[in-house]
Image: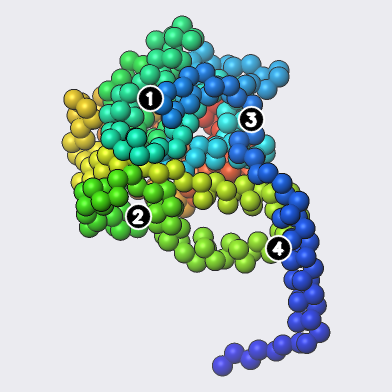
C-alpha cells in the first residue's frame, strides 16, 4: 500500500498558485485578440477555383541561392499555415533563410460544388498548372517540389507522371506504405464502407476527420494538454501560441467526396501505391519513374505517418540520388519545434543548393 502524506499548508499553497494562474489566464485570453494565421508576407500569384498559389516575400538582405524555386504541396486535410505558424516557428521562413524562393499551394475550403473533384483533377490539373505557372514566371523547364504528408503522396504521384518538370523532390512525413503494423489510422479504415459513406454524405466533413485524428491519442490530445495549459496561462506569449495551435487543429476543410473515395480505397485499403497499381487519370503510378534526386524526411515519433510508412520509398523510386533524414519528433513537431528550426529547414536548403 502506498502511504500518501498530504500537508494542508502545501495543498493551500498549490491551490492559491492555481487560482492565480487561472485569474491571469482569463485576462490573457481576453487580451489575446485576433489569432493570426501565417506570419510571413506573401503575394497571391495564381488563382483557380478555391486554390490560391502564393509566393513568399524574401526577407530583406536574403537572396535565393537556388535557381529553381521551391513549391510546397500541402495536404488537403488541415490548413497549410502550420508551415508558418509563428515567426520563430516557421518552416517557410527557415526555407527562405536557407536561400529558397518559396511558393505554396493553398487548397482553400471545398464545398458541395467540388464534390466531383478527383485525384486526377488535383494532381494533373491544379498541381500541374501551378508548376507550369512557376516555370513560365522564372523561364525554367523544371522546379523543386516539397510535398508534406498527403501532399507528399500527391507529389510522388505528380513526379511519377511529370518527371521532366521536377528537378528535385523533397517529401516530409509522407506515407508510402499505408498498411504498416503500427499505423492505427490505417487499421481503423480497413473495414469502413467508403462507397456508402461518400454516396450518403457527399463531401467528408472536416470535423469528422479532425475528431478521428484526435481519437488516435485521446488522453494527450483531448485532455492532458488542457490540464497542462494552466502552467502557461500567466504568460501572454505562450497563451497566444497555444491558441494558434488550437485554431489550426480545428480549422479543418471538408474533403471533396470523389477524391476522398479514391484516396482511402486505393491507398489505405488496397495499399496500391506500394503495388504500383494506383491509377490517376489515364496513368498508372510507377514510382520507379522518379529519377530526380529525392530527400525523404520522416519523424521518428510520428503517430499518423510512422517511419515504416515512409522509408519504403527508397526501394521504389528509380533515383540514384536518394537520401533519408530522420527527425526525433512527431508529425507536428517536425514543423514547429525549436529543434526542427535548427535542423530540418537548414538541411533541406543545403541539400537543394547542392543540386
Which comes before the other along the chain, label 2 or label 3?
3
Q: Residues within 10 Å of mark 1 (few under 14, many from 20)?
A: many
Instruction: Indicate the position of residue 121 as horizontal and vertical percent values.
Output: 30, 28
For the residues labelled 4 and 1, the Cα–Cα distance comes to 43 Å
Which comes before the other along the chain, label 2 or label 1?
1
Q: Residue visible at 43% across and 17% down? A: 143
Whether residue 256 can be seen here: yes
Label 3 secondary element: loop
Residue that badge 2 annotates:
185
Q: Between residue 154 and residue 252, name the one nearer to us.
A: 252
Against 224, is 44 above or below?
above
Instruction: Indicate the position of residue 6 as horizontal and vertical percent values.
Output: 72, 88
Q: Between residue 351 and residue 114, name the one nearer to us.
A: 114
Q: Between residue 3 and residue 164, name the one nearer to us.
A: 164
For the residues labelled 2 and 3, the Cα–Cα distance comes to 33 Å
Which comes before the other along the chain, label 3 or label 4?
3
Residue that badge 4 annotates:
231
Specify the label residue 40 is tagged with: 3
For the residues labelled 3 and 4, the Cα–Cα distance comes to 29 Å
- Of circles 2 and 1, the one toward us is 1
For the residues labelled 3 and 1, the Cα–Cα distance comes to 22 Å
Q: Residues within 10 Å of mark 3 (few under 14, many from 20)?
A: some
Label 1 secondary element: helix
The figure's colour scheme reads rainbow
Which comes before the other along the chain, label 3 or label 1?
3
Label 2 secondary element: helix
> With 208 as the anchor, is 244 left or right in this view?
right
Amino acid at each position: 500500500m502506498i502511504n500518501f502524506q498530504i500537508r494542508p499548508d502545501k495543498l493551500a499553497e498549490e491551490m492559491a498558485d492555481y487560482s492565480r494562474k487561472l485569474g491571469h489566464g482569463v485576462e490573457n485570453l481576453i487580451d489575446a485578440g485576433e489569432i493570426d494565421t501565417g506570419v510571413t508576407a506573401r503575394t497571391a500569384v495564381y488563382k483557380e477555383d478555391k486554390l490560391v498559389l502564393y509566393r513568399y516575400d524574401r526577407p530583406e538582405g536574403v537572396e535565393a541561392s537556388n535557381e529553381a524555386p521551391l513549391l510546397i504541396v500541402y495536404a488537403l486535410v488541415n490548413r497549410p499555415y502550420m508551415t508558418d505558424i509563428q515567426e520563430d516557428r516557421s518552416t517557410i521562413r527557415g526555407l527562405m533563410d536557407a536561400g529558397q524562393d518559396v511558393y505554396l499551394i493553398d487548397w482553400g475550403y471545398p464545398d458541395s460544388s467540388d464534390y466531383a473533384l478527383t485525384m486526377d483533377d488535383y494532381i494533373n490539373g491544379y498541381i500541374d498548372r501551378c508548376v507550369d505557372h512557376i516555370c513560365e514566371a522564372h523561364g525554367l523547364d523544371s522546379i523543386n517540389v516539397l510535398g508534406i504528408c498527403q501532399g507528399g503522396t500527391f507529389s510522388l504521384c505528380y513526379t511519377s507522371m511529370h518527371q521532366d518538370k521536377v528537378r528535385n523532390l523533397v517529401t516530409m512525413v509522407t506515407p508510402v506504405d499505408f498498411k504498416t503494423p503500427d499505423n492505427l489510422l490505417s487499421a481503423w479504415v480497413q473495414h469502413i464502407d467508403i462507397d456508402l459513406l461518400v454516396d450518403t454524405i457527399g463531401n467528408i466533413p472536416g470535423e469528422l476527420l479532425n475528431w478521428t485524428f484526435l481519437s488516435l491519442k485521446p488522453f494527450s490530445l483531448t485532455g492532458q494538454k488542457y490540464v497542462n495549459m494552466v502552467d502557461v496561462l500567466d504568460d501572454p506569449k505562450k497563451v497566444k501560441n497555444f491558441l494558434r495551435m488550437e485554431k489550426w487543429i480545428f480549422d479543418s476543410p471538408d474533403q471533396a467526396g470523389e477524391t476522398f473515395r479514391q484516396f482511402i480505397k486505393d491507398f489505405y485499403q488496397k495499399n496500391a501505391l506500394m503495388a504500383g497499381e494506383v491509377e490517376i487519370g489515364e496513368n498508372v503510378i510507377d514510382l520507379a519513374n522518379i529519377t530526380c534526386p529525392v530527400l525523404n524526411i520522416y519523424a521518428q515519433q510520428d503517430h499518423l505517418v510512422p517511419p515504416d510508412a515512409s522509408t519504403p520509398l527508397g526501394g521504389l523510386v528509380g533515383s540514384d540520388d536518394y537520401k533519408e533524414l530522420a527527425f526525433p519528433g512527431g508529425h507536428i513537431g517536425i514543423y514547429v519545434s525549436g529543434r526542427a528550426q535548427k535542423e530540418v529547414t537548414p538541411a533541406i536548403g543545403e541539400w537543394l543548393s547542392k543540386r
